[in-house]
Amino acid sequence: MLNFLGRNDDLIKTKGERVSPKEIENCLWELNGVVEAAVIGVADDIFGQAIKAFVVADSENKLTTKKVLRHCQLHLEPFMVPKHVEFRKGFEKTPNGKLNKKVLS
């Protein structure tokens, strides 16, 4: 039996666990006011990699870092909760119209 979890290079290794960014992004998209979301791993001295979430919010909702983290704490395992949240006005796209995660940091 094979289980496809996503591309190996997309996995974030944090706190001794392998985390799929897509799982966290799906959780973020469920939060009212989130227009777009992206998750990457960033270097961390303690965890190896820390989870960083980038969020584009609509102008009507007053999303805060605290609200985003609280939503994640309620719906994700503790090791999957982002350590960092950054709000953006939009994301750079590839020529194919996909989100360009390579420019996020």
Image: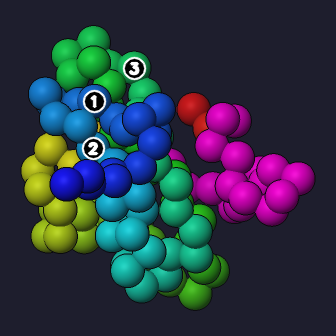
Residue visible at 23% across and 31% down in the picture: 14
Left or right, residue 75 beside residue 2: left
Which label's residue is closer to the chain start, 2 or 3? 2
Q: Mark 2 against mark 3, which lies toward the viewer?
A: 2
Disc 1 to disc 3: CB gap under 8 Å: no
17 within the magenta span:
no
Q: Quadrant of residue 13?
A: top left
Say if 79 sits above or below 31 in the image: above
Q: State the residue lying farthest toward the right.
A: 95
What numbered label is drawn on residue 13? 1
Q: State the residue lying farthest toward the front.
A: 1
What kind of residue is marked 1? Lys
Q: Mark 2 = which residue?
A: 19
Q: Identify the element where label 1 is drawn.
A: strand
Q: Mark 3 = which residue?
A: 43
What kind of residue is marked 2? Val
Report the magenta residues as a range: 86-103
Which label's residue is closer to the chain start, 1 or 2? 1
Say if 15 sits above or below 25 in the image: above
Left or right, residue 65 beside residue 55: left
